Amino acid sequence: MKEKIFEFIEKSEALVVELETELCKRPAISPANGGEGELDKCEFLAGWLKAHGITQLERYDAPYADAKGGVRPNLIATIPGRDDSPESPRFLIMSHIDVVPPGEASLWKSDPWKVEITESGIRSDGTSHGKKITGRGVEDNQQGLVSSVVAALALVKQGITPVHTVKLIFASDEENGSTYGVDWILKNHPDVFRKNDMAIIPDSGNSAGSVIEIAEKSHVWIKFVTKGIQGHAASPDASRNAYLAGADLTVKLYYRLSEKFSDRDQLFQPNYSTFQPTKKEPNVPNINTIPGEDAFYYDMRILPKHPVDEVIREIDKVIAEVEEKHGVTIEYDIGQRNESPPTAGNAPLVKLLSRNVEEVYKVKTECVGIGGGTFAAFLRKVGIDCAVWARIEHTAHQPNEYALLDNILGDAKVFALMMISE
């Protein structure tokens, strides 16, 4: 059986190129990032899957007035297994259909929305790259999406029934926090998931395929708004400079939080909590006016050992100090807050994935934690074991983003083995 499956996957190069090409030409950018959303891409994918024999499909649409069709769609394809009883774990592969904008056009060597196929040369370890597929979204997250589909087709088209029911989940809004994607499904359709499900999220990894992510730092985004009194720059005593207070708060938060929560955990890279000021909103348009309001953002990736509530309490202390010093008021809004327990390194899912990765790629695996956020955080919070894994080149969000054909086909073999493993 395994030989038949692998042979099908190895002959699926044209299928991979076709699906990557069609997905890439349908930009699925969040309205928050200037796009129309994921509807066109989702509808194409559903039609393509049906045409290729994966017919058990369900849509879970999150309402979103500014998106095309007024929705952010989430699509789930089911391949029934030999045992779909409530006691039987199901195998989930979760990828996202949204992508980020291409960024500065001059940095792209080709049209970001038209797939380009090239021979890519040699890896640093001396092995051949094989063919390279270039275009926005082809790696993040279409590599994982296409690999999961090819793995499923290797069974469906050859009449092979998976051991456990397989669900391929194609979600929206991952790039902006999953409010209208996985998080929305969990809150509005919790029956989609079971506690004993096992999920792989093919959205991170390394170029050898040797790392399995089992833990994520808590992920917090905060917007801070400083409110003072606007006035003329020549008369600062009559004003309360919101920009100056905001700058003071920015620096104080960085040093206070970094020192207070300075523990290390070697599971993660970097092995410490990170607190980074990022986005800055414009205030006044002219140089000679003192701003009466100022706003900036922080991205915080916190080791799981530090409760987020403890970090928030320290933030409140720093805010009180800055308010008193500058005579301003400061408000903040937590735009995103994800914290979850890790998946155990000896969980059945992790052991099974490790065994199958080693069989396909001939590498020893190791468990790691990451600072980035994935679907796994949402599922781990409700008790579902997750592993984040892919053999990936890490070109996501970059100009000239690419995925290697060898990686797509190799990962499909790993996923197919997971589908037929007892």
Image (cartoon, helix red, strand yellow):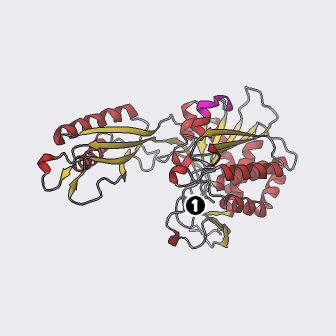
Q: Answer whether residue 6 is visible to the viewer in this image.
A: yes
The percent coordinates of residue 208 (x first, y second) are 59, 58
Residue at 80%, 46% (x, y): give it.
54
Q: Residue furthest right?
A: 159
Residue at 43%, 45% (x, y): give it.
266
User: SS for tag 1?
Assistant: loop
Residue at 37%, 46% (x, y): give it.
298
The answer to whether residue 2 is above or below residue 316 is: below
* In the image: residue 42, left or right of residue 140: right
The number of numbered discs placed on residues in the rendered structure image is 1
Q: Is residue 184 a member of the stretch shown in magenta?
A: no
The percent coordinates of residue 255 (x first, y second) are 27, 46
* In the image: residue 95, left or right of residue 302: right
* In the image: residue 99, left or right of residue 86: left
Q: Answer whether residue 413 is visible to the viewer in this image.
A: no
Q: Which residues are magenta?
A: 186-192
* In the image: residue 294, left or right of residue 337: left
Residue at 38%, 44% (x, y): give it.
273
The percent coordinates of residue 173 (x first, y second) are 57, 46
Q: Amino acid at mark 1?
A: Glu
Residue 180 location, quadrant: top right
Q: Nearer the viewer, residue 60 or 88?
A: 60
Mark 1 is surrounded, within 10 Å at the Cα level, by few (under 14), some (14 to 19) or many (20 or more) other residues, namely some
Q: Nearer the viewer, residue 278 or 229?
A: 229
- Can you identify the residue that label 1 sits on? 393
Q: Nearer the viewer, residue 88 or 361?
A: 88
Q: Is residue 190 a member of the stretch shown in magenta?
A: yes
Q: Nearer the viewer, residue 380 or 277?
A: 277
The percent coordinates of residue 345 (x first, y second) are 56, 38
Q: Quadrant of the C terminus?
A: top right
Main secondary structure along the magenta-highlighted residues: helix
